[in-house]
Image (spheres, rainbow, N blue to C red):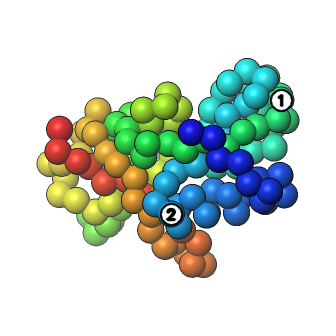
Amino acid sequence: MSVETAASATDPAGVFQDGLAQGELRYQQCRWCADRSAGARLLCATCGGTDFVWERSSGQGRIYRMAPPATAAEVERLVVVELDEGFRMHARIAAVPAHRLWQGAPVRLEAATGDGGALRPVFRPVAA
């Protein structure tokens, strides 16, 4: 589902943040080659295109890769999530018991307030 706003042309980071505020993950899709990416880009990593359309993700995906916890007290772990729409993004996993985390575990989007008050995507494991 496409997200077209006047702000998308002038403030891509704002479009991304507005989506998180509404509980949705917005991503850019290149109109030239259809490559998808989370967040805001000026150039397509695949073809170098500059024409993007904003789309809404389902917010559902799977853990593609996990980094080991840096410390025993670490609350959130860094992961790469592969979204159902076919692109991957770096994110954090919400604090859950370690036995609920494995490569391939299904996850869903949540928004959390990060440093500086900006929202950031966080994923929570869901029942498989």
The disc label shown at residue 22, or none: 2
Give the residue at x 57% y 58%: 19
Number of numbered discs present?
2
Q: Position of residue 78 (x, y in %)?
A: 42, 52
In the displayed structure, 117 sits above or below 63; it is below
Q: Is residue 35 left or right of residue 92?
A: right
Dot 1, how many residues are within 10 Å of its Cα: few (below 14), some (14-19), or many (20+)? some
Residue 112, image x, y percentages: 44, 68
What quarter of the picture does the C terminus occupy? top left
Residue under label 1, please give it.
49
Q: Looking at numbered disc 1 in the image, what kind of residue is underneath it?
A: Gly
Badge 2 density bin: few <14, some 14–19, many ≥20, Cα 10 Å: few
Q: Amino acid at mark 2?
A: Gln
Q: Position of residue 23 (x, y in %)?
A: 46, 60
Query: Residue visible at 63% across and 41% down?
Result: 2
**Disc 2 to disc 1, C-alpha distance:** 28 Å
Q: Please tell me which residue is depicted at 82% across the width and 35% down the height of the picture.
A: 51
User: Is disc 2 in contact with disc 1, using a CB cutoff of under 8 Å?
Assistant: no
Q: Nearer the viewer, residue 74 or 64?
A: 64
Query: Which of the numbered marks, if any, corresponds to residue 13?
Result: none
